[in-house]
Image: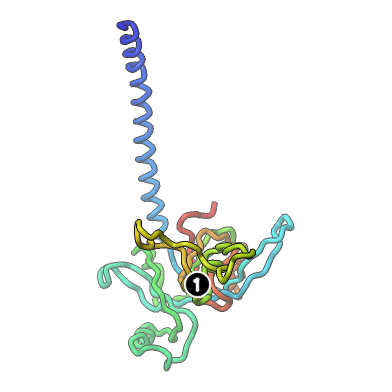
């Protein structure tokens, strides 16, 4: 027993340096990741301009290897700087961008005064883009911003309003299969089935997949690759699908999670 005790004790003591090195390396990794995350967040805030545009539709192109690549055609910009939000006056720094000309009678009087002050023609859509103070100073009111801020093989995040499909059932909304269309099944082919118990818990849990309004919500697709840019026509080609119908409004910005190499 004594020999076994001392053997186990020596074994435990010998494992202490290994455990210490493991904890030390783990702490170094945590410190490195936290510093990298801070730099990543700063890089994210340096240039996160949301350009406004319209979805034209989908087509296909051929890459350098001759493979067919499905792309979405977007008409982005040109957007104009209508106003600049500063930390001194507004508590944060941002660019207010306007897109697509519109007649004055269709613009609110408060917004019309802003356009007259900035000497920019009235725009149909106006959004804000948060940027750092040093980036804010690079832009002037009335300046035009187009697709030239993007390059081929860049990664972008695109947000738009999905197609509204109205009130739909569980098969179209959640992809359920429905009941078997065999003998004995009556008026229950496209139903969702049981949704809860009787005695316990005696209620229906929140988030249950049931019929309801499908679509018509803001959807954001991240890290889509830019397949090509036609600056003279304000056209950008993006690999993959983009939310929303054709001619629907979308916003395009540099990707948050992925950056071009």
> Would you call the spot at circle 1 few (<14 residues within 10 Å), some (14-19), or many (20 or more)?
some
Hey, which quadrant is residue 151 in on the image?
A: bottom right
Foreground residue, 246 or 186?
186
The residue drawn where x is 38% and y is 23% is 18
What is the image's colouring? rainbow
Foreground residue, 222 or 140?
222
Q: Residue furthest toward the left?
A: 88
Pointer 1: what residue?
215
Residue 209 on image: x %, y %: 46, 63
Foreground residue, 51 or 243?
243
Residue 4 on image: x %, y %: 34, 9
Hey, which quadrant is residue 85 in on the image?
A: bottom left
Q: Secondary structure at mark 1?
A: loop
Foreground residue, 208 or 148?
208
Residue 120 on image: x %, y %: 42, 84
Residue 77 seen? no
- Is 13 positioned to the left or the right of 100 in the image? left
- Is 7 positioned to the left or the right of 191 in the image? left
The residue drawn where x is 55% and y is 60% is 224
Q: Residue furthest toward the bottom?
A: 105
Q: Is residue 208 above or below residue 160?
A: above
Residue 150 on image: x %, y %: 53, 64
The residue drawn where x is 40% and y is 46% is 36
Q: How many marks?
A: 1
The residue drawn where x is 67% and y is 61% is 69
**Quadrant location, the N terminus:** top left
Residue 108 seen? yes
Q: Residue furthest toward the right?
A: 66
């Amino acid at each position: 027993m004594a020999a076994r005790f001392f053997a186990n004790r020596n074994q435990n003591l010998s494992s202490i340096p290994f455990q210490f090195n493991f904890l030390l390396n783990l702490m170094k990794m945590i410190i490195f990741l936290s510093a990298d995350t801070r730099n990543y967040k700063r890089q994210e805030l340096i240039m996160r301009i949301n350009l406004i545009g319209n979805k034209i539709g989908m087509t296909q192109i051929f890459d350098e290897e001759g493979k067919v690549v499905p792309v979405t055609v977007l008409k982005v910009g040109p957007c104009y700087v209508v106003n600049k939000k500063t930390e001194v006056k507004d508590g944060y720094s941002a660019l207010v961008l306007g897109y697509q000309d519109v007649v004055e009678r269709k613009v609110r009087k408060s917004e019309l005064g802003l356009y007259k002050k900035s000497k920019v023609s009235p725009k149909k859509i106006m959004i804000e883009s948060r940027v750092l103070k040093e980036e804010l100073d690079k832009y002037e009111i009335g300046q035009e911003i187009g697709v030239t801020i993007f390059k081929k093989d860049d990664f972008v995040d695109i947000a738009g309003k999905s197609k509204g499909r109205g009130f739909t059932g569980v098969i179209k909304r959640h992809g359920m299969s429905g009941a078997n269309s065999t003998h004995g099944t009556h008026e229950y082919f496209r139903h969702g089935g049981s949704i809860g118990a009787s005695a316990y818990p005696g209620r229906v849990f929140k988030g249950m997949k049931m019929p309801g309004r499908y679509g018509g919500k803001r959807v954001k697709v991240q890290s889509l690759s830019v397949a090509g840019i036609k600056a003279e026509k304000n056209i950008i080609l993006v690999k993959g699908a983009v939310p929303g119908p054709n001619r629907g409004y979308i916003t395009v910005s540099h990707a948050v999670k992925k950056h071009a190499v």
